[in-house]
Amino acid sequence: MDRKRSAQSGPEGRVIKYFETLDSTNITAKEFAEKGAPEGTVIQAGQQLAGRGRLGRVWKSQAGKGLWFSLILYPKTAAEFCPQVTLLTAVAVAEALQKAAGVQGRIKWPNDILLDDRKICGILSEMALTTEGAIEYAIVGIGININMSSEDFGAVLADTAASLYLATGMEYECKQVLKAVLEEFDQLYGQWHREGFAPIRKKWREYNCTLGRMVTVKDNDEEIYSGTAEDVDDYGSLLVRNAAGKIESFDFGEVSIRSC
Ligand code: BTN
């Protein structure tokens, strides 16, 4: 693995560590967090050789084609509320894509960003806990397809994936998109610490394309529940009302849904 890297300071002294090639920015971010990297440190890779998605999936991360990075955070909350940070991040990405490229991203629960029903961004959050169960650190990994063409996606993803290039016909500088995401993220993360989850959930609802829709909840490809997506709760779980009117909550660590 090539670990050639450079470090720079972003806005307000943020540390941004750029590597040409990593296996996964989430893995390297964990190594930095274990060594006490400051809050907000960014680990970015030009390409990932083993980019990871949710539910054990692979995340395609070619050189120069997208923004592949992880944020190191120390959220001041109980561990069960950490999913709020992931929802907050999805809002930040949707707002940043609008500002940087004028596109209207929609959030599919839990945290996929879609353009015209195709996925442009995925978020993989992981956390480490102390022996007392408090958050030691959280890693929020974000992958945004920037300059990917249909050929870059290949046959398997061509019908389901989006990029800024495909959506607008223009190529974008990854660092400009990164700057926009970090600006939005910092603002929302600050608001979340000051005011709690309520204003974030309000924004998440505005950007989401899942609530009010019929959804099928799947666990390991097996359909386990279906109904109307009603809301997200304080744990970031999706509340689904079935035909009999019974509401169940689903944790995004375990299930995926079909909707949007
Ligand atoms: C998903 O939708 O399945 C989540 C995808 C997350 C991909 C990003 S790319 C940067 C970071 N490093 C990883 O290995 N994964 C995340």
Image: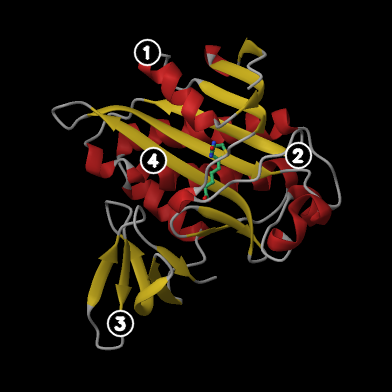
Give how far apart the Cα atoms at labels 1 and 2 are: 30 Å
Q: Secondary structure at mark 4?
A: helix
Vertical comparison of 241 with 94: above or below? below
Quadrant for residue 85, please give it.
top left
Q: Which residue is mark 1?
A: 36
Q: Secondary structure at mark 2?
A: loop
Amino acid at dot 4: Val
Q: Which residue is mark 2?
A: 65
Vertical comparison of 169 with 186: above or below? below
Q: Which residue is mark 3?
A: 242
User: Within 10 angstroms of label 4, few (less than 14), some, or many (20 or more) residues?
Assistant: many
Amino acid at dot 1: Gly
Amino acid at dot 2: Lys
Q: Disc 3 or 2, which lies upstream in sequence?
A: 2
The label on residue 85 is: 4
Side of 121 where 241 appears, left or right:
left
Give residue 148's position: percent from left, percent from top.
77, 47
Side of 23 where 196 appears, left or right:
left
Give how far apart the Cα atoms at labels 3 and 4 are: 28 Å
Q: Secondary structure at mark 1?
A: loop
User: Within 10 angstroms of label 2, few (less than 14), some, or many (20 or more) residues?
Assistant: many
